[in-house]
Amino acid sequence: MKKILFLICTSLVLMSSTFLGTPEEIISTLKKGNSAELSQYFNNYIDFALPDKEEIKNMGKNQATIALKTYFDEIGVQTFQLTSQREAGSTMYITGKLQGKTKNINLTLMLKNNNSKYSITSIRIG
């Protein structure tokens, strides 16, 4: 009985650390250029790729938050322009352009569907 209670509590803690949202909420957050707000939608582990760097698989949520904030600050993200949104099974892809102060950067997000709510499982910038 104690083991079952422990597993239930552990599961609730892990699930509560990921904020699930709708694709529209995630796109709206991208348009604000706010990396801290966007990171609320991260899965606990994500695949993360920046231009001219190797992709990091299963990066922790905290580390990915710091890396994204650093990159957003570096290019001065001002807004996001959606170019495509498509769904395949329980996975959704969002692509578009991050508009920075001096350049525009391509962005692709992969989202995982969990009961009509989504969390970001992959970010590719470049």
Image (cartoon, helix red, strand yellow):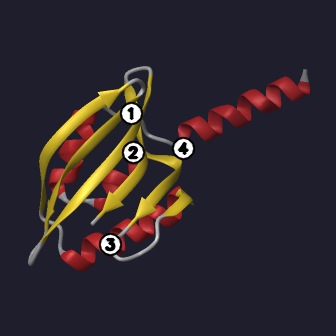
Provide the residue designation for mark 3: 51
Assess whether mark 2 and mark 1 are in contact (beta carbons under 8 angstroms). yes
Q: Amino acid at mark 1?
A: Tyr
Instruction: Residue 76 in the image: state x and y as whole percent.
Output: 18, 74
Q: Amino acid at mark 4?
A: Ser
Assess whether mark 2 and mark 3 are in contact (beta carbons under 8 angstroms). no
Q: Closer to the observer: label 3 or label 1?
A: 3
- Residue 4, located in which quarter of the rendered image? top right
Assess whether mark 2 and mark 4 are in contact (beta carbons under 8 angstroms). no
- Residue 39, located in which quarter of the rendered image? bottom left
- The alpha-carbon separation of the residues under discs 1 and 2 comes to 8 Å
> Circle 4 sits in a helix, a strand or a loop, which is it?
loop
Q: Closer to the observer: label 4 or label 2?
A: 2
> Circle 1 sits in a helix, a strand or a loop, which is it?
strand
Provide the residue designation for mark 2: 41
Residue at 50% x, 52% y: name it.
Answer: 46
Q: Amino acid at mark 2?
A: Tyr
Q: Closer to the observer: label 4 or label 3?
A: 3
Going from N to C along the chain, the mark reached first, 4 or 2, is 4
Few, some or many residues within 10 Å of mark 1 (<14, 14–19, 20+): many
Few, some or many residues within 10 Å of mark 4 (<14, 14–19, 20+): some
Q: Amino acid at mark 3?
A: Pro
Q: Give the position of the N terminus as an image quadrant.
A: top right
Going from N to C along the chain, the mark reached first, 3 or 2, is 2
Provide the residue designation for mark 1: 118
Instruction: Residue 37 in the image: state x and y as whole percent.
Output: 32, 53
Going from N to C along the chain, the mark reached first, 4 or 3, is 4
> Circle 2 sits in a helix, a strand or a loop, which is it?
helix
Q: Nearer the viewer, residue 75 or 3?
A: 75
Q: Which label belongs to residue 17?
A: 4
